[in-house]
Image (spheres, helix red, strand yellow):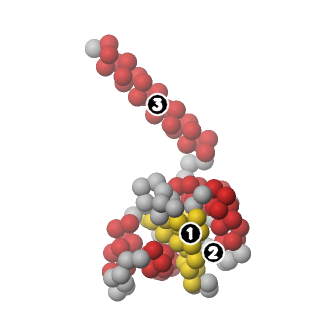
Amino acid sequence: MSVKQTWMFIFDQAVSSFKSKIKSAECIELIEQLKSFKIHQVILEATGGLELEAAQALQEQGFAISIINPRQARDFAKASGKLAKTDRIDAAVLAHFGQAMQPAITVLASVNEQALQEAVTRRRQLVEMLTAEKE
């Protein structure tokens, strides 16, 4: 899966490729569509957080996901002789990467765990600010 700001490009060898909008409603439709395929693992390229909503939704529906470093994907594409870079090619390269390299499963924190992490981070920031003002 190649995730861009508004579109997600999906590659499956059985259906070649297709694209889907990233918005929440379309994400639900995408997951329903993906359930009809025999998917063992979904490979996403880290794109500065754009992939997280889709990854979280997929994980909640029971899909095994792997979020990989973009450099790994690009190096793999070059080694495979894929020098062109388009969204459809990226999606196909990620699918091939997943089959060949079998990357480790990424386990994301649940929505509640993420909220707790954000609250703890914010508390730490406030404590640091208060400490700095007292000094």
Q: Amino acid at mark 3?
A: Arg
For the residues labelled 1 and 2, the Cα–Cα distance comes to 7 Å
- Specify the label residue 28 is tagged with: none
Q: Secondary structure at mark 3?
A: helix
Picture residue at 53% right of the left edge, 67% below the top:
8
Establish if 70 lies above or below 93.
above
Compare marks 2 and 3 and give the one earlier in the sequence.
2
Query: Can you give x and y, in whole percent of width and height, for residue 63 in the image?
Result: 63, 65
The answer to whether residue 29 is left or right of residue 65 is: right
Q: Residue furthest left?
A: 135
**Label 1 sits on residue:** 42
Number of numbered markers: 3
Mark 1 and 2 residues: CB-CB less than 8 Å, in contact? yes
- Residue identifier under label 3: 122
Q: Residues within 10 Å of mark 1 (few under 14, many from 20)?
A: many
Q: Secondary structure at mark 1?
A: strand
CA neighbours of label 2 inside 10 A, class few (<14), some (14 to 19), many (20+)? few
Mark 2–mark 3 distance (CA, rounded to whole Å): 38 Å
| Label 3 CA crowd tier, 10 Å (few <14, some 14–19, many 20+) | few
Residue drawn at the location 41% of the way across and 77% of the way down: 86
Name the amino acid type tagged 2: Ile
CB contact under 8 Å: marks 2 and 3 = no
**Disc 1 residue type?**
Val
Which residue in the structure is indicated by mark 2? 39
Left or right: where does residue 86 sit relative to residue 55? left
Seen at 56% across and 80% down, the residue is 17
